[in-house]
């Protein structure tokens, strides 16, 4: 098992990094994913393929999109088996009236927060790690 599993250690050791760009969520039929896209994430669902990509890229390809958001990367290597990490973060952001769409990669967790609320989210995350 790779990465940190201790919840208190994850919270106190995390730092949050705002990633450049405005991201959106798009869905396309599985057999209609444009080959020249560069999504941050692709996820296959029964109803279609979800893509998270830059808004400018979605617009350039004429893809309808939702949830303009900013991406925040949590700069700690959390284990995929860590219990409660995203739940604690989502709960804290909810207490500040902010939704979040978390995505876990192998090394890091990433938060997609509403565009315009990224600084609020960074402040909340910073206060959590103190």
Image (cartoon, rainbow, N blue to C red):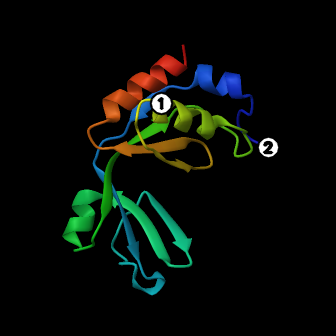
* Quadrant of the image occupied by residue 108: top right
Residue in the picture at 55% in, 35% down = 91
In percent of width and height, residue 25 lies at 37, 61
* Position above or below: 9 against 82: above
* Position above or below: 64 against 11: below
Q: Answer with mark 1 or mark 2, whichever residue precedes in sequence.
A: 2
* Quadrant of the image occupied by residue 36: bottom left
Q: Quadrant of the C terminus?
A: top right
Residue in the picture at 35% in, 59% down = 53
Circle number at residue 1: 2
Q: Secondary structure at mark 1?
A: loop
Name the outermost residue toward the bottom: 31
Q: Quadrant of the N terminus?
A: top right
Q: Which residue is mark 1?
A: 95
At label 2, counting other C-alpha atoms closer than 10 Å, the crowd grade (few under 14, some 14-19, many 20 or more) is few
In percent of width and height, residue 113 lies at 39, 43
In percent of width and height, residue 22 lies at 28, 49
Q: Secondary structure at mark 2?
A: loop
- Of badges 1 and 2, nearer the viewer stands 1
Q: Is residue 20 left or right of residue 95?
A: left
Residue in the picture at 40% in, 22% down = 123
In percent of width and height, residue 16 lies at 46, 29
């Amino acid at each position: 098992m790779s990465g940190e599993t201790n919840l208190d250690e994850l919270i106190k050791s995390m730092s949050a990094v705002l990633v450049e760009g405005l991201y959106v969520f798009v869905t396309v039929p599985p057999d209609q994913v444009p080959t020249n896209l560069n999504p941050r994430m692709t996820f296959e669902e029964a109803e279609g393929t979800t893509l998270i990509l830059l808004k400018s890229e979605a617009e350039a390809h004429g893809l309808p999109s939702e949830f303009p958001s900013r991406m925040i990367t949590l700069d700690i290597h959390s284990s995929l088996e860590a219990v409660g990490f995203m739940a604690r973060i989502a709960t804290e952001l909810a207490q500040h009236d902010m939704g979040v769409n978390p995505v876990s990669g192998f090394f890091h967790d990433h938060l997609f927060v509403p565009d315009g609320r990224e600084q609020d989210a960074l402040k909340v995350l910073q206060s959590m790690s103190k």
